[in-house]
Amino acid sequence: MQYRITLPADYDMAIIRQRIADRGHLTDDFPQLVFKAYLYADRNQPYADGKENRYAPFYLWRDTNGMNAFLGGAGFAGVITSFGRPAVRAGSVWHAETAPDLSTATYASCQTASITEQVALGALRDAEQTGVRSDIERGALAAVSAFDPSAWTVMRFRLWRDAVHASSQGVDVYQVGHVSQPSAKH
C-alpha cells in the first residue's frame, strides 16, 4: 500500500523530515504491519532528478485487516487533516522478501509498470519472483512485487542501504526517514 502526496516545488522538506522524526515511532508496533517505510523525495537532491517534492509512505501488511485498521484509525486521520485525503494504491503482493532488520535502509525505489494484454500473468509473476531474488542478492534490504488488477499494473518496491538513482523510466527514488518494523523487535 502506498499513497503519494505531491508537495509544492518550494515546499520546505524539513517539515516532512520533522514530521517523520516526530511521528515515525507511532507505527513501530502497529498490528499486522510487516513494515512501513516513511519515504520522501526532495526535488533539489540529485537522486530526485528534479522531479516533484513528495511524501510517500509505503506499507507492507500481513493482511488487509491491518491495512483497514490503519486507514480507519487516528494515524491516517492525521494524514487527512494535514494533506487532504490522498488516493491509496494497494495491490496483491506476488512476492516479498525482507531482511530481519530494515533500520539501515536509507533509500527506496518504486517502479510502476503497465501490464499489456499480451502479457501472460503467470509468466510475469514468475519473472517478478526472479527480480525480487535478484535484487535481494544485489543488496536490497526489502523487495516487494505487487499486482494491481484495477489498473493492470505491477509495482516493484525496493529498500536500499545505499543511494540509488532511477535506472529506467517510471522509477521513483526516495529517501527513507524511518522504518517501522514490528517483527524486528520480537
Image: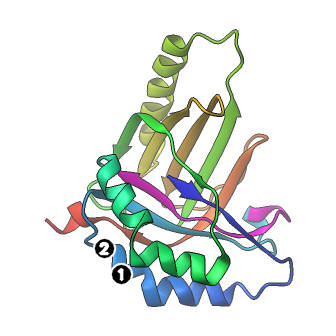
Query: Which residue has dot 1 on it?
Result: 25
Residue at image location 44% in from the left, 57% down from the top: 59
The reply to whether residue 105 is in sight is no
Residue at image location 35% in from the left, 48% down from the top: 64
The answer to which of 100 and 157 lies nearer the viewer is 157
- Dot 2 alpha-carbon crowd within 10 angstroms: few under 14, some 14 to 19, many 20 or more: many
Q: Is residue 59 above or below residue 182?
A: above
Question: What's the CA distance linking mark 1 and mark 2?
Answer: 5 Å
Residue at image location 58% in from the left, 76% down from the top: 80
**Residue 59 falls within the magenta-colored stretch:** yes
Q: Position of residue 44 (x, y in %)?
A: 81, 75
Query: Which residue has dot 2 on it?
Result: 28
- Is the C-beta separation of discs 1 and 2 under 8 Å? yes
Q: Position of residue 12 (x, y in %)?
A: 75, 88
Q: Which residues are magenta?
A: 48-61
Q: Which mark is residue 157?
A: none
> In the picture provided, is 143 more to the left or to the right than 152?
left
Q: Amino acid at mark 2?
A: Asp
Residue at image location 44% in from the left, 85% down from the top: 23
Q: Position of residue 184 (x, y in %)?
A: 23, 64
